[in-house]
Amino acid sequence: MPRAPPKRACGCTRMPLYPLFLPHTMGQYFKAVNLDKKEYICPWCLGGGAKLWEWAANSQGSIFTLLLRKSDEGGGGDFYGYHKGCDEGGPIRCPLSPVAGRWAGDRIALVGDYDSSRLYDVADSFRNISKEVAEEWNAFIELPERKIHHRPDCSCNESRVAA
């Protein structure tokens, strides 16, 4: 005979969380969109999931640290650190990255497909920068378990080729 869920002190029943994540549950998908540059990042192109929780819990959510970096000087632990020849608190003398700081100061959103703005769908007409971001992130992070795996077979790339 199955056990009943435990009762809380308030008298309500405490249900386990796992039914919220059953395979038949769809949920809302999110993509990162830059309104100023008309660019987006596809979570599936980065080998991750698209739900808000998946952005937060997986390596793909870390890309914002690189995209939003804002400083004209480098130092230890920075993208423009010692490995690129920059001194602590010194000016950046190496070639500038096309990704590091790319979205700093721009209007960006992690927009859901249920949002009434329809920006999630409009963003499909924007430029997908997922590949460049994955390549630059992987060169920066160096830790194998934190690397992002770009998927050129992602369906959003297929729709672009057909267009």
Image (spheres, helix red, strand yellow):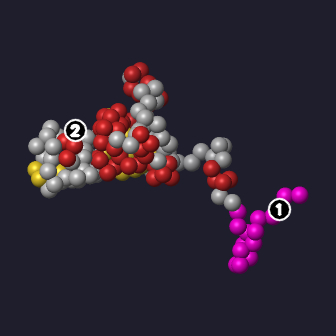
Query: Looking at numbered disc 2 in the image, what kind of residue is underneath it?
Result: Pro
Look at the image and tell me whether residue 154 can be seen.
Answer: yes
Q: Nearer the viewer, residue 60 or 82?
A: 82
Q: Residue 62's mark? A: none
Using residue 79 as the reference point, say whether residue 144 is left or right of it: right
The secondary structure type at the circle numbered 2 is loop
The residue labelled by disc 1 is: 3
The C terminus - image quarter: top left
Q: Position of residue 109 (x, y in %)?
A: 36, 51
| Amino acid type, residue under disc 1 in the picture | Arg
Residue matched to label 2:
98
Spatial CA distance of label 1 from label 2 is 57 Å
Magenta highlight range: 1-15
Residue 126 sits above or below residue 4 on the image: above
Q: Quadrant of residue 18?
A: bottom right
The relative height of residue 4 versus residue 25 in the rendered view (above or below) is below
Mark toward the start of the polypeptide (1 vs 2) = 1
Closer to us: 72 or 15: 72
Which quadrant holds the N terminus? bottom right
Q: Is residue 67 left or right of residue 163?
A: left
Q: Residue at x 57, y 48 (%)?
A: 27
Residue 79 at x, y percent in the picture: 24, 46
Displayed quadrant of residue 149: top left
Please tell me which residue is depicted at 32% across the width and 51% down the height of the picture: 65
Magenta run includes residue 7? yes
Q: Magenta segment, principal secondary structure?
A: loop
Give the structural element (helix, strand or loop) at label 1.
loop
